[in-house]
């Protein structure tokens, strides 16, 4: 598939994906969601040497300033369900991607942009980043998972306040609330995200994927997170990486993981 709205830079096992709609503040339109679906559901899974993914926005103003309102302002109730389900499905692909995905939030992350950042496993914010779910200003609610993930990250009380008032919070407040992992100087978001992925890449790849899988199970409707953990732990016990990691620990040397 040819990507029109995504720029992908693949260096040393790390894919940096830039949503390239700067004039539209990188707003998520149907084509952009289609391209994200293709990468996280197909192309990215086929990259055998992939260590992780950085997701960011073009320019300095916005990570993603929201969904493209021109595409859904005339939707009926039934069409709205289909529209929102498409976004949720794409974001589930990101959340369940077996390699770590880090959002490098370099500006406004509002509406669908905040939801996209929350679908990533980790978030690095530039000091000028702003987060919010302002959908009530449009007579809407978050539809790409925002009502669920924001509660998971910062708790019901504060999440309700932000969604009901449509207030934005800055990077430091997002860090204080636990929405982001770190705040860095403006312009250093991608570099910090890559450094974080490099640190994770030194660990056992199968174990990293199983951590993502087990943690996600905690939030999945109908899933037993503890049972998922048991199965993931057992899967890790059967890997060469576990034997290598245990041997390296006992022999007081650095482990050399193969992802098998």
Image: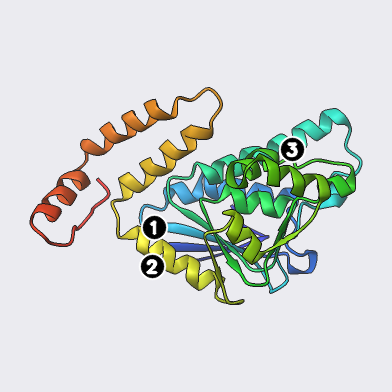
Q: Nearer the viewer, residue 33 or 154?
A: 154
Residue density around tag 3, few if under 14, some if 14–19, many if 20 or more, within 10 Å:
some
Q: Position of residue 126 (x, y in %)?
A: 61, 70
Label 1–label 2 contact, CB within 8 A: yes
**Marks 1 and 3, the one that precedes in the sequence:** 1
* Residue at 65% across, 45% down: 150
Label 2 to label 3: alpha-carbon separation = 35 Å
Circle 1 — which element?
loop
Residue nearer the viewer, 217 or 77 = 217
Which residue is situated farthest in the right direction here? 74
For label 3, the residue is 84
Relative horizontal placement of residue 102, taking residue 232 as reference (left or right): right
Q: How packed is label 2: few (under 14 Cα within 10 Å), some, or many (20 or more)? A: few
User: What distance separates the C-alpha of mark 1 from that of mark 2?
Assistant: 8 Å
**Quarter of the figure with residue 232:** top left
Residue at the spot x=65%, y=38% of the render? Answer: 148
Q: Which residue matches tag 1?
A: 51
Q: Looking at the picture, does residue 234 appear above or below residue 170?
A: above
- Locate residue 250 relative to residue 67 in the image: left or right: left
* Spot occupied by residue 242 in the image (x, y as percentages of width and height): 20, 44
Q: Which mark is residue 12?
A: 2
Q: Residue furthest top?
A: 222
**In which quadrant of the rendered image does the C terminus lie?**
top left
Is any atom of residue 19 visible in this view? no
* 195 to 140, vertically: above or below: below
> Between residues 204 and 22, which one lies in front from this camera angle?
204
Type of colouring: rainbow
Query: What secondary structure is found at the residue carrying circle 2?
Result: loop
Counting residues from the N terminus, which is met first, the one under dot 1 or under dot 2? Answer: 2
CA neighbours of label 1 inside 10 A, class few (<14), some (14 to 19), many (20+): many
């Amino acid at each position: 598939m040819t990507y029109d709205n995504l720029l992908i830079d693949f260096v040393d096992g790390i894919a940096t994906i830039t949503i390239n709609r700067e004039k539209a503040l990188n707003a998520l339109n149907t084509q952009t969601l289609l391209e994200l679906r293709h990468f996280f559901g197909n192309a990215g899974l086929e990259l055998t040497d992939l260590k992780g993914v950085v997701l960011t926005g073009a320019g300095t103003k916005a990570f993603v300033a929201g969904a493209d309102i021109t595409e859904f302002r005339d939707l009926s109730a039934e069409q709205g369900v289909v529209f929102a389900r498409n976004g949720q499905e794409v974001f589930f692909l990101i959340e369940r991607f077996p390699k770590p995905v880090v959002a490098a939030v370099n500006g406004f992350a509002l509406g669908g942009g905040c939801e996209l950042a929350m679908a990533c496993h980790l978030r690095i914010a530039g000091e000028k980043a702003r987060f919010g779910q302002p959908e009530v200003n449009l007579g809407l609610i978050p539809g790409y998972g925002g009502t669920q993930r924001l509660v998971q990250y910062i708790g019901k009380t504060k999440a309700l306040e932000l969604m009901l008032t449509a207030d934005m919070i800055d990077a430091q407040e997002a860090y204080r609330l636990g929405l982001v992992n770190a705040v860095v100087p403006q312009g250093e978001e991608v570099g910090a995200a890559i450094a974080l992925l490099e640190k994770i890449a030194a660990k056992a790849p199968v174990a990293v994927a199983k951590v993502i899988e087990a943690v996600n199970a905690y939030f999945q409707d109908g899933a037993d997170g503890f049972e998922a953990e048991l199965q993931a732990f057992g899967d890790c016990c059967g890997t060469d990486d576990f034997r290598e990691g245990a041997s390296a620990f006992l022999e007081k040397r650095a482990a050399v993981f193969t992802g098998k």
